[in-house]
Image: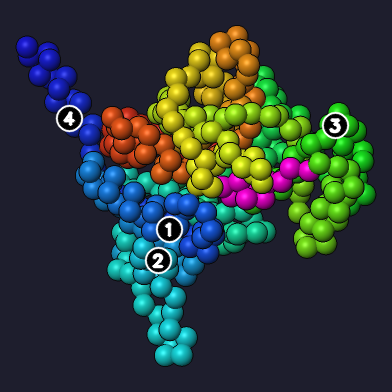
Amino acid sequence: MAQSFSKFITEEVKEQSYKLVVFNNASEQIRDVKDTGLSELTKLIKKSAKAVDVEVYLVDFLGCYVSYKNGKTYINSLPLGEDGVKLPDIKGNEIEYQDPIEIHPETTIIMPRGLGTLGMTSSRYWVDIIRRFELEGYITIPNLHCWDMCSSKYMTDILMNQHGLKTPKTVAITHSEDTERAVKELGGKFPIIMKSSIGTQTGVGVVIVESLRSLNAMVQMMLLWEQHIPLILQEYVKIDYDIRVVVLDGNILGAMKRNVIVSDSDFRSNVSLGGEAETIELTELEIRDSLTAASAVKGRLVGVDLIPSKDREKEQPLVLEVNSMPGFGGIEKITKDKSITQEIFRHFKNRDNWKGNDDDTT
């Protein structure tokens, strides 16, 4: 009895509340798809944090800066409501800020969900702010290494292959006249998938191409718009559904089957675009490869997207993508017996789970 009581006290001491600072980028939100607005994310984060007694602070990268006073560190942010960041009144020359948020590496976790993509929806200054926190010992989820690797679908493909995982065959396009060579390397068959290696969001930026003639025109148009945008081609794999797996610190939190949108004009499965989701039981191979994919990008909290094989018990799935900032809205709706978001926040109440960023790029 005494031993059990001692163990109970030890476990209780480990459970401590903390501050969670969630960085957003209101300008990155896509408004023409379902449940991706800042208001939905804000409501879910606030509700889940309150349920597990975690202090949550929402800030926007826009206008944010770090200050130091009397040996303490503060985050200063413009007001952020459900409709986004409140911009300064230029005419009245008034700038209103939230109360400064005091932070410390031993009591605060930084969650930079709004980092976006450098050169498109991000700023080097924002990245430097998060790097500064990492250098000062803060846990950042995702860490910058994971964010960087997952920001490039081409690099993700390289990493997955290096770790023995299967992926759809992928070829980079190097210039506007490179399409014929790339298609031949891909196998020479249409349809194929063309996407930007960076900057896609909720399936936007992914197109299916039916002919070399159409591909040439699309590539030339994209490179006219942005000369250095990295484009990739992938083999088209016809599916009825794909699988999103949420991984936290080497454990599977949940998985959902995302059915392909039934439409003559669409082929994607994103829940935020209207795809239907349901629960699914993973096979041992799918569990193994999901955990390997998360480890390959050094991700503590990631969403791994899989294309299931025909024989799921015996054949490896294809790893389609690893998302360093997975959404929780879709999987929350189908996991009736638990809240994935609450489990994530509760996980870090145990200080044994505060192990740093594992940001070694070697």
SS of the residue under disc 2: loop
Q: Residue at x 33, y 69 (%)?
A: 98
On whether residue 90 falls in the magenta region, the answer is: no
Q: How is the image coloured?
A: rainbow
Mark number displayed over residue 268 = none
Tag 1 and tag 2, C-beta contact below 8 Å = yes
Evaluate whether residue 174 shows in this view.
no
Sequence-wise first label, 4 or 1: 4
Q: Which residue is mark 4?
A: 12
User: Could you tell me which quadrant the C terminus lies in?
Assistant: top right
Name the mark nearer the viewer: 1 or 3.
3
Q: Which segment is the magenta one?
A: 200-209
Q: Which residue is mark 3?
A: 189
Q: Which residue is mark 2?
A: 83
Magenta stretch, main secondary structure class? loop
- In the image, residue 359 lies at what x, y percent? 54, 37
